[in-house]
Image: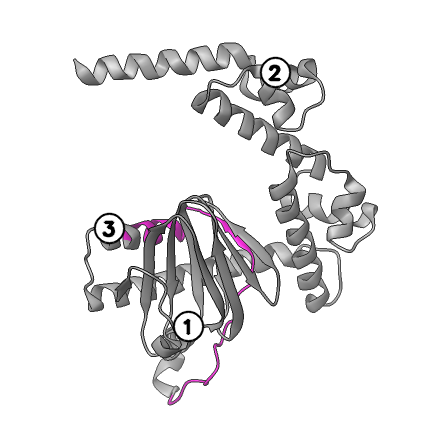
Amino acid sequence: MILRKYPESISNLNNKNFIVHFTTKGFELNNHVSPLSIKCSMKGEENYKTSVGIYRVTTGKYLIVNEGQDCSSQIENEAETFSLYFDSKFSNEALQSLMTPSDKLLNVSFYPSRQPVHFFEKLYLHNNILSPTLMKLRLASKVNYDDECWIKEQFYDVLEKLLIVHRDLYKEIDKLPSIKFSTKTELYKRVCNAKEFIDSSFTTSISLETISKEACLSQYHFLRLFKTIFKITPHQYIIKKRLEKASHLLMRTDLPVTDICFDIGFESLSTFSWMFKKKFGISPDPFRCEYHKYIYKNKILTTD
């Protein structure tokens, strides 16, 4: 079932798999108890609040919310929201089936009443595991292909892919230096929260001390754990985010290079130019010129 707006009561649809897909310039969804769901934004952003944290869902990321979680959301500017909501019985039985070895399936006479997998609630980067199925469902929604059997098959495929993402994530968590797995999970959660803080603040002047406080860890422990998980230091990650933002602004806007430099958080134009060239192999101004030449050339080729 495909809905073009959030239902007045999501709990009334607990016995159905459904998609919510619409474009709006502003919307607020009041607090409710969510089924297992995946939240995406195909344009703009949507801000979600749960009892676990606050998440800014943008075009490059999706959010997993577990069954039974309190959740609310807000869209302030134009955005295209796209979310999958899983029927509780369907998700429980499908996940149990996916987790049960084939030689045990004939002996399984009942399924547990609660969701057998507790997914890690966080923002995930779109990837080649789960995202292709999400994009397929979005395309189906755009052309109003609301075939219940087909959508059910795709929802099953999404759960299968979610388990792969889930297992890969816990392999990462298991690398953390701690004895108890519950401690590792808590540390991973704290570092991810700090990373999301960086994602929302990287254009401002933020210190290691400020970021580590978001994780409620000492600077030394946070630095070590961040590097263990993401294979990069917090400072390197901030620079990476700033340079990616700079390249986008150079390609998509006519802002002067100096304005871009200071807007994304650099305090020195020479430092910005040096780091940009180090990453992309070319200075900012020539980068913009080459991009415009590339676009112009392609326009000529496509019109010939």
Residue shown at the point (39%, 14%) measured from the top left: 292
Q: Tell me the chief SS of the magenta region.
A: loop
183 vs 12: above or below: above
Label 1, label 2: how many angstroms apart (C-alpha)? 52 Å
* Classed neighbour count for the residue bearing mark 3: other residues with Cα under 10 Å, few (<14), some (14–19), many (≥20): few
* Classed neighbour count for the residue bearing mark 1: other residues with Cα under 10 Å, few (<14), some (14–19), many (≥20): many
- Tell me where residue 106 appears, x and y as whole percent: 34, 84
Which of the 4 quarters of the picture holds residue 5? Answer: bottom left
Which residue is tagged 3? 142
Label 3, label 2: how many angstroms apart (C-alpha)? 41 Å
Residue shown at the point (69%, 68%) measured from the top left: 182
Q: Secondary structure at mark 1?
A: helix
Which residue is tagged 2? 258
In the displayed structure image, the side of residue 151 where residue 38 appears, left or right: right
Which residue is tagged 1? 95
Quarter containing the N terminus: bottom left
46 vs 50: above or below: above
Residue shown at the point (61%, 68%) measured from the top left: 51
Quarter containing the C terminus: top left
Q: Describe the colour scheme in one phrase.
A: one colour
Q: Secondary structure at mark 2?
A: helix
Per the rendered image, the range of residues in magenta is: 109-136
Mark nearer the N terminus (3 vs 2): 3
In the displayed structure image, the side of residue 156 where residue 229 appears, left or right: right
Q: Residue 33 colored magenta? A: no
Q: Residue 125 colored magenta? A: yes
- Tell me where residue 221 appears, x and y as whole percent: 80, 50
- Tell me where residue 273 appears, x and y as whole percent: 63, 15
